[in-house]
Image (spheres, grey):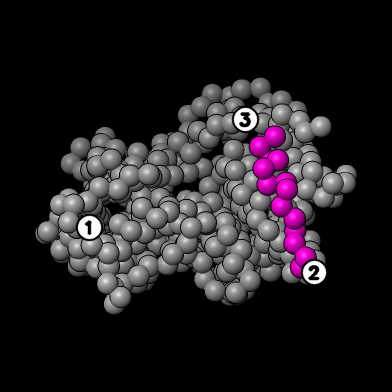
Amino acid sequence: MVSASSSWLVAGAVRSWGADAPNNRITLGVIGTGKQGRHLMNNFLNQPNTQVVAVCDVDTTRRKHHQNLVNEFYSIKTGKEYKDCAAYAEFQALLARKDIDAVVIATPDHWHAYQAVAACRAGKDVYCEKPLSLTIHEARAMVNAARQYDRVFQTGSMQRSSKEFRTACELVRNGRIGTIKQIIVDVGGPSRPCDLPEEPLEPGLDWDFWLGPAPLRPYNSILSPRGVHDHFPNWRNYREYSGGMMTDWGAHHFDIAQWGLGMDESGPVEIIPPDDPKATRGVRFIYANGVEVIHGQSGGVLFLGTEGKILVNRGKFEATPESVAAEPLGPNAIRLYNSYSHTKDFLDCMRSRKRPICDVEIGCRSVTVCHLGNLAYWNHRRLKWDPVKERFVGDEEANQWLDRPKRGGWQV
């Protein structure tokens, strides 16, 4: 009998691993088994010729639960009892396995960089959730590691694998709304220092290891809810672990702004905070071509050109005037990378050794925009940025903000 907890897996269980020899099968380990980790694990379980062989989490209940989900999935799939999915409390043990081809990292943001760099060093390809990093320095370190060890690295900014976003960016890149003047990106505000009170720490969670590189502080369940839960924990609201909605949703929407501008290997040259030092919207990013990207209210990502506008969001596409999108693009038009599945694209690129739709360099550049916005908000400082050198221009104090001290030797 299939338990209620694993009924969501049954649809994919009728698939086989295929007739390929075992050495053609991609083996995966999942690091971080919260809500997003479970979602990604499900996606990869249902990909052909792919096998999840290990899970890792600092919470005992979540770790064992996801181990059981994988074992039950393959028991249904193969028609015989399966107990081979391993469960690890520490990611280093998972990375030490020579039979794992790639890892899926869905831990809190403050862990991404160290785990991803370690995975590259261990010869694993990487699918890492967005936002890619906690700091600008970390993002570049992840790119450097992927290139040094020749790894395929997909950033989980999966809106690039959705048709409406690709269509919008193709129309913009092909001049359908004329010259781009502004882009208004609608996401929430920056994170704030953590001020949560201490709560009793129950057995089963390695709290010190959950904190890892972050400063030592008492446990609070808002940061790491105990057991299996079905919500996105609010550690993302606190500066020690994340950049707030500015990076959480910004890694989606600013990523689309960068794609539409053709800035996947660049970024803004000036960042201007709003006049009100308490404001959490209104920061402006000025690009070298004169385009202004504004963190404001638009209902998604709003491209404003001299001849029209395009608003795009998940499941939403509006072109004004309608003629902007009425005619298909011609044979000589600029065409963008076409992916209909972020997970499948990653696996396909593992086999071909090509770079995926949201390669680590793209994830680095997009999250850097978000970090720059946060630094402008936090310090209420007008900043000049060199996107080639990835340094602030004439501002050594600001260059100290490119990274943070890390606890326990977890520096990258």
Q: Bounds of the magenta span?
A: 7-21
Q: Of tags 3 and 2, which is closer to the observer? A: 2
Q: Does the magenta stretch include residue 16?
A: yes
Q: Which mark is on residue 326?
A: 1
Classify mark 3: residues with Cα within 10 Å, few (<14), some (14-19) or many (20+): few
Residue 106: x %, y % from top left: 59, 48
Reading the chain from its start, which is encountered first: label 1 or label 3? Answer: 3
Q: Residue at x 76, y 51 (%)?
A: 54
Amino acid type of the residue tagged 2 in the rendering: Ala
Quadrant, the C terminus: bottom right
Q: Residue 389, relative to residue 252: is it above or below?
A: below
Res 116 visible: yes
Which element carries disc 3, helix, strand or loop? Answer: loop
Whether residue 396 sits left or right of residue 403 in the image: it is left
- Give how far apart the Cα atoms at labels 1 and 2 are: 48 Å
Q: Does the magenta stretch include residue 276?
A: no
Which residue reaches farthest right? 81
Amino acid type of the residue tagged 1 in the rendering: Ala
Residue 118: x %, y % from top left: 65, 62
Residue 407: x %, y % from top left: 60, 48
- Nearer the observer, 285 or 329: 329
Q: Which residue is drawn at 54% across and 62% down?
A: 345
- Give how far apart the Cα atoms at labels 1 and 3 are: 45 Å
